[in-house]
Image (cartoon, rainbow, N blue to C red):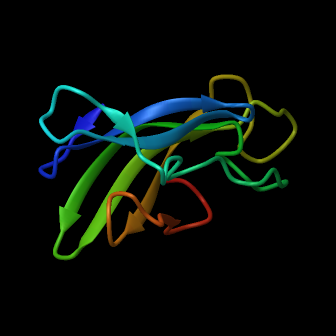
Amino acid sequence: MIALASQMVVTEQKNSDGYVIGVATSPEGITWTDSAKSHILETSKQRDDSWDDGMVSQCNVTKIGETFYMLYSGSTNSFGRQYSGKNKMAIGLARAQHPEGPWENTQKTPF
């Protein structure tokens, strides 16, 4: 969970496809509510070269200028593809103009 200056927090949530990154808000930092715009970063579509179609999680959000950047972990659990294998994880980078998104991946391959 990462607290941002606007009292917004980025959390990991689980959907039917695996872990995704969502956002919750709080007016006072005690009572948290899932944002209507959650999930802000979901798994990619499964392709031969996809690397984060199993889950996205463990994020860190930083604001540089007017843009928010998110480093996140991603993985796939499907064997036989370029980025595959149980528990093989990589780091991705996404960006947005607001913490609630929309977020876009900045590259097709992980770091």
Q: Nearer the viewer, residue 108 or 69?
A: 69
Identify the residue at image location x=39%, y=34%: 11
Name the spot of residue 31 as percent of width and height, x first: 24, 27
Q: Is residue 52 left or right of residue 48?
A: left
Q: Is residue 13 left or right of residue 53?
A: left
In the rendered view, would you say 6 is above or below 25?
Answer: below
Q: Nearer the viewer, residue 9 or 90?
A: 9
Identify the residue at image location x=12%, y=50%: 5
Q: Is residue 5 left or right of residue 44?
A: left
For the N terminus, the quadrant is top left
Q: Nearer the viewer, residue 25 or 52?
A: 25
Q: Nearer the viewer, residue 8 or 82?
A: 8
Identify the residue at image location x=74%, y=35%: 17
Residue 75 placement: quadrant: top right
Residue 33 placement: quadrant: top left
Q: How many numbered circles does the render carry?
A: 0
Name the spot of residue 15 as percent of width and height, x first: 66, 32
In the rendered view, would you say 106 is above or below 85?
Answer: below
Name the spot of residue 52 as percent of width and height, x first: 64, 45
